[in-house]
Amino acid sequence: MISRWRLLWTVTVSHAFQGGPSAGLGFSIPESTRTTLAGLGGRVRESAGQLQVAQSLDEDGQPKEGWSGQALLFGLHPRDPNFERYTLLPPLPRTEIPLFANESSPDDLPPQPRGIELTGPHPSLQPRLAQRPLQLRLSHPDGKPVAGVRLGPTDERWRPPFPLPPGEYQLDEDTGNGTTARRQLLVDAELASCRPWGLLRLHVAPAHLSLPHGQLFTLSLASRPERLRYYLVLTPTDDADLASLSVVDNRLPPPAAPVLFSRRDAADFDESHLSPIQLGAVDARRVVLFEAMTELPRQARGPQGFELHRQEEVLVANLPQPGAERSDAQFVIHLK
């Protein structure tokens, strides 16, 4: 008879943008994970930014056998429509999504996930190497072969000759002249159909089963760095008046490395900058750009203390910062 429950895991999302716990990323529980938990006598609860998995205990306070060595898979889905605007995305190929897992350390999630390609049981695989002929080998992570093919000059894709059971695979490409490529595949029909932003996979270590409050995991996300650009549109009194303008980093407490701003006139703009016409610089109006020489990560509450000076006068005490909804860190300031 089951008498009580005990937490196995608690996973919390932490984002540098919010400076701590974040509800911007949620969890989905696929049917395969629910089935595994039901067989083990487990429960799962998902709330904004947190996932909890509990194990049932018998009358002697012991969990059901079979937990140790199990791996449970969860989808990661942004709850905030601006999530990707302020999140530093892992540098992965466009076909891959981030996989966070406690593979290297059973009690931690690495800050840098690895990439994996999510697919259903009938994948149509396009090689990354263009050279032909090309040998493709599909195998299990332990190297056990699954299937293979040799692509000819007119072959662009390969579909394995049978449905792939759920699980992880690796696909190796070999030109035969020393050029190779490898990528990881994860076959899960349900997750592939809902297209998550990322995946979380947790392995049950024996020590997790006896912890009184379960193992704590933190899924840490970094903020997207931005280069601040302040376009000043104004009608200066004279050239000396224009030259006296500056942007100064007066944040408190003073940072170890203050941000310096370079000055550009409209004639020095390139294709990455806004054009003077876009900025409304007509007739006697002039444009001066102050561009940060280093990037800063986005923050929900941006740093205060970037000031616009005119000689010794502070014209703007706190220049604007990019919030969650902005696509870039370019700001236009019209001065009278």
Image: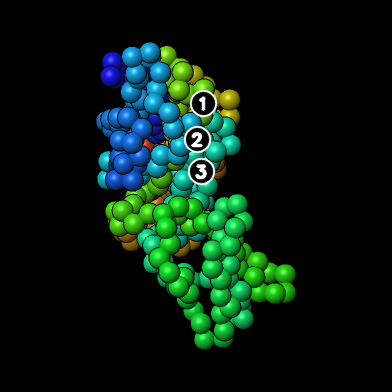
Residue for point 39% across, 57% down? 274
Q: Position of residue 220 (x, y in %)?
A: 45, 33
Residue 113's tag is: 3
Asked if residue 323 can be seen in this view, the reply is no
| Residue contact between numbered discs 1 and 2, judged by CB atoms under 8 Å | no
Q: Quadrant of residue 135?
A: bottom right
Cα separation between marks 1 and 2 = 8 Å
Which residue shows up at 40% across the image and 22% down it?
Answer: 63
Q: What is the count of numbered marks?
A: 3
Q: Residue at x 45, y 22 (%)?
A: 209
Whether residue 47 sits left or right of residue 131 in the image: it is left
The residue at which mark 2 appears reads as: 69
Q: Which is more toward the observer, 209 or 201?
A: 209
**Left or right side of 89 for 30:** left
Q: Amino acid at mark 2?
A: Gly
Residue 275: numbered disc: none
Helix, strand or loop status at disc 2:
loop
125 or 335, which is in the foreground? Answer: 125
Circle 3 crowding by C-alpha within 10 Å: few under 14, some 14–19, many from 20: many
Extreme residue in the right direction: 177
Reading the chain from its start, which is encountered first: label 1 or label 2?
A: 2
Find numbered disc 3 in the image and state the secondary structure of the residue it sits on. Answer: loop
Residue placed at 40% from the left, 65% from the top?
A: 163
